Amino acid sequence: MKIVYFTHSLLSCWNHGNAHFLRGVLRELSSLGHDVVTLEPAGNWSLSNLIADHGDAGLTAFRQAYPDLQSRVYARVPEALSHVADADLVIVHEWNDPALVAAIGRARLRGGHFTLLFHDTHHRAVSDPEAIHAFDLDGYDGVLAFGEALRDVYRQWGWGSRVWTWHEAADIRHFHPPAVEQARSSLVWIGNWGDGERTQELENFLFEPARAAGLPLDIHGVRYPDEALRTLERYGVRYRGWAPNARAPEIFARHLATVHVPRRYYTTILPGIPTIRVFEGLACGIPLVSAPWDDSEHLFRVGQDFLMVPDGAAMTRALRALASDADLRRDLVRHGLETIRARHTCAHRVQELLTIVSNLRETEAEQPQRSVA
């Protein structure tokens, strides 16, 4: 198949988590012999910020880790549309301009022979629903939602059986334990400060427990305002700045453990969505402790693959236990790797995608061709 994916950016992961999963999925599709084309808009926000902060050197890690992946840059919607005419499958990520989303849908309605899917990997459907309603999805065959709770939102909006849960996953070609173990020390957290939707949670489940457990804490990420940096300094946290996601395995390999602190939306109105850092951390073989969230889809074996704690005091106890108990660390790593490799790799997600597309095509063949005047 010729598969076209419209992303915000493949090149840049600067505050753009979808790039992590996308890279792994596209590489898996290519390895199966599919003709994969990735398109991103010129001057996109993520790449512009990366270049502004780090120059072209900021792309080195991506190029070294994914030499087989390339992205085509377009400046105008007609230029982007020129790539879909002979496509078999087109996927459009929700971090795209509404005008582009609508234009691709119209191309589908006007006789496009490709299967067209909308890919939602964010909480805006509940945190900013008007932003999602701004998309004209009339021409779309279906929606890929990165969690069952988000799928339910689209069902309520009338998508019925045309929305599928398509979780993120780990690219285990790149995210895996180190070939040779080295000395590990301290905690690490890779994440962006964001818009303040988990500030209190970070203090309660990361900064204070790390300090109370006597474990140094390294943090990598972007969008840390001065107030956030002052908070890190107050807790004695070592802020390391942005790290390209392709460097995450080597960062995890130097550290004793990591912590997952879900954004508030994923613990309240969109429960059950762990986001990709959990998959990547477990794939890299680093012990993980999580603040509370409801694994309503039973993606993991909580207590075996990773530890989950109810409050900051329990987090402190868990971190102390990890620091002192090598057997506990080994057990968590072993079980976490088992679950990732058995259920949550990009190869698994590609097979899920291909099954969805195959079923859609069978259904489409049984129905009259849609058209628009």
Image: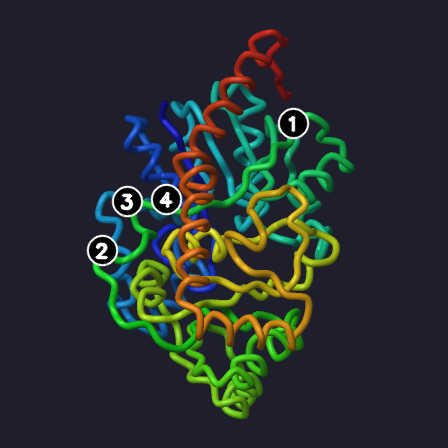
Number of numbered discs visible in the structure rendering: 4
Residue shown at 31% from the left, 55% from the top: 177
Could you tell which of marks 1 and 4 lies nearer the N-terminus?
Answer: 4
- SS for dot 3: loop
Amino acid under disc 3: Leu
Residue shown at 25% from the left, 53% from the top: 65
Q: Which residue is mark 4?
A: 24
Where 20 falls versus 206 (above or below)?
above
Residue shown at 49% from the left, 35% from the top: 91
Q: Position of residue 149 (x, y in %)?
A: 69, 44
Instruction: Tell me how far mark 1 sits from mark 3, CA to CA.
Output: 30 Å
Amino acid under disc 4: Gly
Q: Does the residue at mark 1 contact the one at mark 3 (Cβ under 8 Å)? A: no
Instruction: Tell me how far mark 2 sits from mark 1, CA to CA.
Output: 42 Å
Image colouring: rainbow
Q: Mark 3: give few (<14), some (14-19) or many (20+) Cα within 10 Å.
A: some
Could you tell which of marks 4 and 3 lies nearer the N-terminus?
Answer: 4
- The numbered mark at residue 69 is 3
Residue pushed farthest right?
156
Q: Which residue is mark 1?
A: 162
Q: Which residue is mark 2?
A: 179
Q: Position of residue 271 (x, y in %)?
A: 69, 51
Tell us which disc is closer to us: 1 or 4.
4
